[in-house]
Image (cartoon, rainbow, N blue to C red):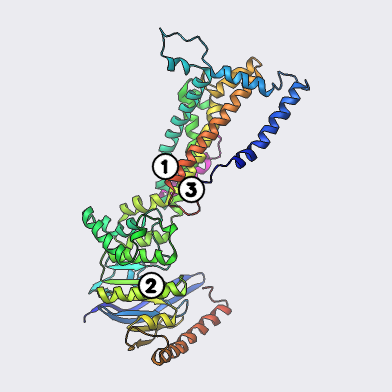
Amino acid sequence: MSSAIEIRDVHKRFPIPGGEVVALQDINLTVEAGEFVCLLGPSGCGKSTLLNAVAGFSQPTSGTILVDGRPVTGPGPDRGMVFQEYALFPWMSVAENVAFGLDIKGLPKAQIAERVNVLLEKLHLREFRDRYPKDLSGGMRQRVAIARVLALDSPVLLMDEPFGALDALTRRSLQDELLKIWQELGKTIIFVTHSIEESIYLADRIVVLTYRPGTVKRDVRVDIPRPRDSGTNAFNELKRELAVMVMEEQHRHEAAEQAGLTTD
Amino acid sequence: MKAVTWKSVAEGAMVPLATLVVWQAVCSMGWVNAHVLPSPLAVAEKWWAYLLPLTEYDPASQSWLGWALSGELIIDSIGSLYRVLMGFLVGGVLALPLGLLMGSSNLIYRWMNPLIQVLRPIPPIAYIPLSILWFGLGNPPAIFLIAIGAFFPVLVNTIAGVRHVDGIYLRAARNLGAGRGTIFLRIILPAATPYILSGVRIGIGTAFIVVIVSEMIAVNNGLGFRILEAREYFWSDKIIAGMLTIGLWGLAIDAGVSRINNHLLRWHRGLDH
């Protein structure tokens, strides 16, 4: 396996009134092609900041990010992003949303239609192709968002707490579907979450980040065979271990909050 | 859209009917001078006469349809609606691109906004003297005034619409590979349409107010002209007939615009249709 994403010495500082926040400090991380990596940590640990830097939405203050050997200079369709807020275009139907990326690439209509049909089928959206996003449930919307990035066939998927707003059952079935897609298409996935259970259920590797400054606290490989069962001992042992680490950071976050240093 | 039921129609008609009854009663009792406040029946009679052609039907000189539509009320309505449409088009066509520019470019916004803010509070009516000086009499000054009335609501709402586009749509579009032109045409423009269309609705409403005023100065037909003319002759029944016509057209236009909006915004949350 070759490395798909290389994050080298990345720092990110934000100016705030009366000072600055060190959101990321000294991040070094390599993600292999086809690997499923979860970034785990409490609010304010910089996991979304790191994901946004890989997506190219904001440049790190220093350090470099290489995707497939090329430095990231801006957002691009080689790194499809799935947002927690779905970010579907509400004025486009389901099919138009999925077709958008292909459409602006100028692909022939017939080819777009065929690709869209395949994806709608794969994500069980065929019946909803002409609906507008407002008429869909949260789970359905996130399926559309996933279909929309899959349409571009980007090797890398970046997911920013994509299932955070969904109910537990919908969440589980989307997790299963994502795993199926990942195994079938061999995507490289960076998945941000603050759910310990979700990260163990999904990831090959879990990277735990610290609360400000955001650094890599632990990089844990998950060796439990899939499909993973949250009732097994191995699952629960890892869960306890991660909970200790994440809660340490959560307590630092709460302490900062109570000291009035932050509001997030 | 909610279904119209007999019950809702009856409920809605209750207060207007009661008003008519009281009004008619007050007039029939002779409590008010008929020149000051004519009775509803007198107004209805005048309205009917106002609607009918002024001359007898003469097949030799005109078609039947042309004759049927030759009543003053119809000529006046066409005149007023034409001015509203032209004025709104001029104002809207100027406001939309300027609003899009000011909304999407901070530099242009900073340059243009002070001037806009100074001009915006000037009511279109204050332009009447200048409009006559610049455009003389007839339709041009009226269209100019209406255009000013329609310009600012469309402009201000377009700017707000563009500036309020949710950043997440822009990020998603950039992520999917959209360039600046695509983002403008396929993201910013549709995302701003709810604001723009509400500006259009307000703009048409303003245009309709201004047309009545503008017709009182420089033209010789139109609903505004007619009610002022009627005042000269103390035809208070005709004044009220004209006012009711203005009200009905205003209602019809607003209902039409709102239907178009609902269709264009069928994707938008929070609309019942």
- Compare residues A103 and A45 and report the one nearer the observer: A103
Q: How many marks?
A: 3
- Residue A46, percent from left and from top: 42, 76
Label 1 sits on a secondary structure element that is helix
Q: Mark number for residue B110? A: none
Residue assigned mark 3:
B273
Residue at mark 1 shares a chain with residue at mark 3: yes
Q: Is residue A160 left or right of residue A35?
A: right
Label 3 sits on a secondary structure element that is loop
Residue assigned mark 1:
B96
Residue assigned mark 2:
A174
| Magenta residues (range) | B107-123
- Residue B83, percent from left and from top: 47, 27
Residue extending farthest to the front is: B6
The residue lying at 49 percent from left, 31 percent from top is: B146
> Is the C-beta separation of discs 1 and 2 under 8 Å?
no
Residue at mark 1 shares a chain with residue at mark 2: no
Q: Amino acid at mark 2?
A: Leu
Q: Amino acid at mark 1?
A: Leu
Q: Nearer the viewer, mark 1 or mark 2?
A: 2
- Residue A91, percent from left and from top: 39, 53
